[in-house]
Image: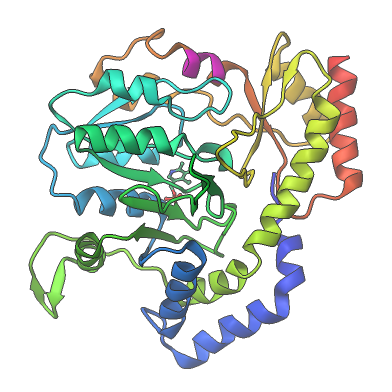
């Protein structure tokens, strides 16, 4: 699904030198490489504060911890996402309220958010799934109307641009009160291990988050709040800093591959190609199709026989997972999410796809569907 080796080979001298520099400096934790990457990411995103941390799951958890919520407070989010989004809500004894998505963008439907608001609702977590922003203008207006926090789960859409109706543009993850991202190796901005970051323009939240990532420690060995140990290590920061300078070029390569897939597969009546929302650029973390009238599993088997990987993100929506059964959701509660989980499949998507590979993949799909 990804070709991390091919991508590394292209920037090997810089990466190897950056890793060696950290090793020789022995500044493994919170060294200058972390601060340099933090500043460069702040500039790239146009956001006041980036707080690096250990992974995207921690970023979401720390974001929630910084909001002084109480057990039982409700957090509205999507069920069509990676488990981390809902897991952290549960871990903090908050209540996840999962609502349905838009069938074309796969992203949370603002009308469904409105319907789910109760006096206990405190937070909305929109997830920019597969690399494209949610309808943030509507979500921010709901947030304003009902005085709710918005934490963007931007683990899959770093680098995407959101265009407001007045023409202004902001980077994904910098629109809500807090944004969270993951630097998991296969992400669009991937480290060579785990990593994550929190973004905010709110000085007070940033201060709290900086303490929380470091055991709630304000002065050495004085702990003013309960925190965690969640750090981005210097080697990962040095690698990410180099890859950040290539992020837009990586998004371009992903878009070129996506355009190729779409051009070849759009004419197939039984396949729905991804819709690009007018208000967002797409950075194609995943290229995800809908099988409309044929067996997705049979196609995946056919592709696998031709050595082509295909994945299902996500086969079981979170409201129907065993771990969350105590919330009482039933099959049929979120019909669009449930239908998507039975019909979506994702094709290989990365920065190193060649036209030969793309042609081979598309021809293999056409063989099966026509
Ligand atoms: C939507 C979403 N949220 C959260 C995460 C968690 O990130 P991490 O794996 O870095 O903890 C991921 C990535 O795996 C993700 O795709």
Depth check, front residue: 26 or 197: 197
Q: Is residue 19 left or right of residue 349?
A: left
Q: Is residue 338 magenta?
A: yes
Q: Is residue 243 left or right of residue 68?
A: right
Seen as rendered, the residue at the extreme front is: 166
Q: Quadrant of residue 122?
A: top left
- The kind of secondary structure the magenta stretch mainly shows is helix
State whether residue 125 appears in this view.
no
Residue depicted at x 23% and y 69%: 214
Residue depicted at x 57% and y 59%: 189
Q: Is residue 112 above or below residue 303?
A: above
Q: Is residue 369 magenta?
A: no
Q: Position of residue 334 (x, y in %)?
A: 41, 14
Q: Is residue 99 left or right of residue 168?
A: left
Depth check, front residue: 331 or 204: 204
Which segment is the magenta one?
336-340
Q: Position of residue 45 (x, y in %)?
A: 48, 62
């Amino acid at each position: 699904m990804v070709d991390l080796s091919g991508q590394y080979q292209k920037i090997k001298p810089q990466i190897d030198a950056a890793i060696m520099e950290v090793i020789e400096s022995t500044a493994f934790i919170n060294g200058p490489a972390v601060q340099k990457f933090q500043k460069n990411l702040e500039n790239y995103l146009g956001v006041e504060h980036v707080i690096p941390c250990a992974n995207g799951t921690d970023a979401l958890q720390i974001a929630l911890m910084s909001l002084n919520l109480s057990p039982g407070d409700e957090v509205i989010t999507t069920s069509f996402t990676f488990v981390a989004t809902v897991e952290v809500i549960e871990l903090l004894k908050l209540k996840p309220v999962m609502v349905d998505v838009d069938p074309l963008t796969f992203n949370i439907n603002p009308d469904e958010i409105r319907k789910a608001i109760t006096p206990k609702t405190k937070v909305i977590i929109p997830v920019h799934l597969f690399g494209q922003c949610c309808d943030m203008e509507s979500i921010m207006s709901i947030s304003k109307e009902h005085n709710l926090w918005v934490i963007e789960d931007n683990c899959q859409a770093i680098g995407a641009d959101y265009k407001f109706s007045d023409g202004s543009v902001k980077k994904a993850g910098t629109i809500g009160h807090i944004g969270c991202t993951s630097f998991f190796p296969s992400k669009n901005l991937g480290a060579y291990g785990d990593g994550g970051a929190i973004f905010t323009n709110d000085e007070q939240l940033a201060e709290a988050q900086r303490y929380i990532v470091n055991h709630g420690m304000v002065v050495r060995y004085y702990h003013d709040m309960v925190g965690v140990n969640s750090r981005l290590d210097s080697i990962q920061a040095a690698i990410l800093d180099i890859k950040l300078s290539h992020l837009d070029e990586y998004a371009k390569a992903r878009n070129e591959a996506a355009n190729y897939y779409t051009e070849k597969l759009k004419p197939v009546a039984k396949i729905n190609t991804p819709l690009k929302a007018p208000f967002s650029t797409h950075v194609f973390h995943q290229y995800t199709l809908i099988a409309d009238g044929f067996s997705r599993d049979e196609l995946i088997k056919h592709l696998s026989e031709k050595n082509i990987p295909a994945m299902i993100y996500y086969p079981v929506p979170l409201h129907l997972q065993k771990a969350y059964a105590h919330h009482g959701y039933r099959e049929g509660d979120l019909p669009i999410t449930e239908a998507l989980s039975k019909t979506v499949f994702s094709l290989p998507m990365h920065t190193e796809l060649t036209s030969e590979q793309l042609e081979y993949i598309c021809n293999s799909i056409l063989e099966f569907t026509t």
